[in-house]
């Protein structure tokens, strides 16, 4: 099976040649979509001293916003000493009834890294996923939590949080929400009313849909109908997507187009589309080499720029240690000893490249050879990824369905989801090298400093290169499968006097 799409990322079709010419036009600028968000645990905290400090990597990657959900404290609907509201018999208006300390510490860590927080309100998993017993009390507790994080109530953070998400994968079987859809809707209404009481200008959304291609579903169409009929705010509609079942970085284009059409059909034309989790693999039994994962990350970060997604969060931008399931998540980055690897370097290189002014690029393809370029002041950057889909992804499917098993202690939960149609174009074009032809540079006839950085950790340069009198320069790269390079050209003003 294959699919076609009238829209495509900047680039030409795959060409049957081992060398690809990529043309960067430094004279044609546009803007990047703000997709440099991450999810993950920012660092150690009481009870989890083994968690590494991720904030240096997040600074290097230029992370702009961090989704809070996979942190220690969550709002459970049943008594839990580690919950933001530990005892549901406690007085709601008393600051002493809340357990803010651990989450405050991590919020401050994110803010110190120069990023803002998207605060997600959901229960702990897998231990607590029941609906609220008293919806009015639940709403009042949410109101105080929002006041703490956006207005400083009860000693809240000095930097206010402006973005609030409700829910986390309520459609993920009984694993994340063990209630009826109507109970989830009622909690969303209470959440929205609570946020409105604090500050109607705050940004709200949800529901972090796990299976976004399941049609006529209660947490997709049913949720949207409830929101519309009750005139509730929905500034963004959030969903997640991992590619365990396809290994295709262009799944995101297909899934987001489907959801954009769904939102528009239901009248939510002004609602943003937020990809609240994305990564290569998420199922604990899924495996792939770090180089393959890193190449996928970089290629996907480039392809995402040409989707209708408004905001995106890579998950997980941490070690993968999970305080809730007690597993090492395959979506984590870095080695088992918390050293950098191809995944963490891909996160950093993509973050550095996809900022500033976006430059026009042609010559990439939809088979994993992805290229993006930018200009940020006196630096021009070119990010190039040669992701090669594994053979298992190229075997013709019998159906567009992926089934998998999630281990919860001794229990094994069987789940399944609908996949985008399989693309024959996913097969690599076999590119082994590239010539990067950068045109219309603003430094004609001048010498620039060139540095090449790879996700292997190798750095070549800086070395001098001359821009032609016409403002052009050509650079050659060997491209092994699963390789990623960031090429940086720095103007040398000292030689221009």
Image (tube, rainbow, N blue to C red):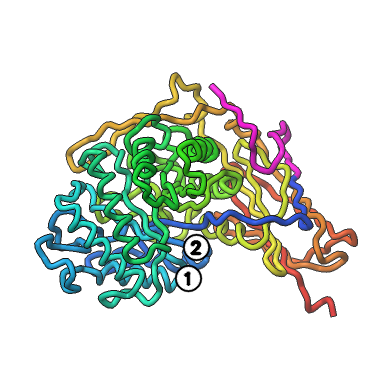
Give the class, few, some or many, for how many residues have Cα within 10 Å of label 1's Cα (few <14, many ≥20). Answer: some
Residue 249 visible in image: no
- Going 72% across and 38% down the picture, which residue do you hit? 12
What residue does disc 1 label?
114
The answer to whether 426 is drawn above or below residue 42 in the figure is above
Q: How many marks?
A: 2
Image side of residue 263 versus residue 129, left or right: right
Expressed as whole percent of the image width and height from the top left, the position of residue 338 reads 39, 61
Q: Reply yes or no: does residue 13 show up in magenta.
A: yes
Expressed as whole percent of the image width and height from the top left, the position of residue 197 reads 31, 64
State if disc 1 and disc 2 touch (CB < 8 Å): yes
What residue does disc 2 label?
63
Q: Nearer the viewer, residue 146 or 488?
A: 146
Q: Secondary structure at mark 1?
A: loop
- Going 22% across and 38% down the picture, which residue do you hit? 180
Q: Nearer the viewer, residue 186 or 166?
A: 186
- Going 73% across and 40% down the picture, which residue do you hit? 19
Expressed as whole percent of the image width and height from the top left, the position of residue 55 reads 43, 67
* Numbered circle sitting on residue 28: none
Image side of residue 432 versus residue 247, left or right: right
Earlier residue among tags 2 and 1: 2
Q: Main secondary structure of the magenta part?
A: loop
Q: Nearer the viewer, residue 318 or 418?
A: 418
The answer to whether 317 is drawn above or below residue 410 in the figure is below
Q: Secondary structure at mark 2?
A: loop
Cα–Cα gap, marks 2 and 1: 8 Å
Q: Which residues are magenta?
A: 1-21
């Amino acid at each position: 099976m294959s699919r076609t799409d009238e829209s495509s990322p900047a680039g030409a079709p795959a060409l049957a040649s081992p060398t690809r010419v990529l043309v960067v036009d430094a004279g044609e600028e546009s803007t990047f979509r703000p997709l440099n968000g991450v999810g993950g645990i920012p660092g150690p905290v009481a009870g989890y001293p083994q968690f590494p400090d991720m904030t240096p990597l997040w600074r290097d990657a230029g992370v702009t916003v961090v989704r809070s959900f996979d942190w220690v404290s969550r709002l459970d609907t049943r008594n839990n000493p580690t919950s933001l509201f530990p005892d549901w018999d406690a007085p709601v208006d008393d600051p002493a009834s809340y357990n803010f300390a651990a989450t405050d510490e991590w919020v401050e860590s994110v803010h110190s890294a120069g990023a803002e927080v998207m605060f997600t309100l959901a229960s702990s998993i897998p231990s607590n996923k029941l609906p609220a017993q008293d919806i009015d009390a639940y709403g009042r507790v949410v109101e105080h939590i929002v006041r703490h994080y956006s207005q400083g109530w009860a000693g809240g953070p000095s930097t206010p949080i402006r973005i609030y998400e409700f829910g986390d994968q309520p459609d993920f079987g009984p694993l994340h929400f063990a209630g009826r859809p109507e109970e989830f809707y009622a909690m969303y209404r209470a959440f929205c009313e609570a946020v409105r009481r604090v500050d109607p200008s705050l940004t709200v959304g949800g529901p972090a849909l796990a299976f976004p291609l399941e049609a006529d579903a209660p947490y997709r169409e049913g949720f949207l109908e409830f929101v519309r009929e009750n005139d509730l705010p929905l500034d963004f509609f959030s969903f997640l997507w991992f590619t365990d079942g396809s290994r295709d970085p262009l799944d995101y284009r297909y899934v987001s187009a489907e959801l954009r059409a769904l939102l528009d059909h239901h009248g939510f034309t002004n609602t943003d589309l937020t990809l609240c989790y994305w990564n290569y693999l998420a199922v604990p039994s899924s495996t792939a080499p770090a180089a393959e994962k890193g190449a996928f990350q970089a290629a996907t970060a480039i392809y995402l720029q040409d989707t209708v997604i408004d905001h995106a969060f890579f998950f997980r931008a941490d070690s993968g240690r999970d305080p809730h399931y007690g597993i090492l998540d395959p979506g984590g980055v870095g080695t088992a000893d918390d050293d950098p690897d191809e995944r963490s370097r891909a996160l950093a290189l993509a973050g550095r490249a996809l900022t500033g002014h976006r430059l026009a690029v042609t010559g990439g393809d939809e088979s994993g050879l992805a290229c993006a370029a930018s200009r940020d002041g006196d630096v021009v950057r070119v990010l190039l990824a040669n992701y090669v889909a594994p053979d298992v992804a190229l075997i013709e499917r019998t159906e567009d369905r992926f089934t998998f098993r999630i281990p919860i202690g001794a229990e094994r939960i069987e789940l399944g989801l609908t996949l985008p149609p399989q693309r024959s174009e996913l097969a690599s074009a076999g590119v082994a090298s590239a010539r990067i032809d950068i045109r219309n540079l603003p430094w004609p006839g001048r010498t620039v400093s060139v540095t090449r950085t790879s996700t292997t950790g190798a750095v070549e340069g800086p070395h001098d290169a001359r821009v032609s009198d016409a403002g052009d320069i050509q650079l050659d790269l060997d491209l092994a499968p699963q390789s990623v390079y960031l090429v940086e050209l720095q103007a040398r003003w000292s030689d221009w006097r």
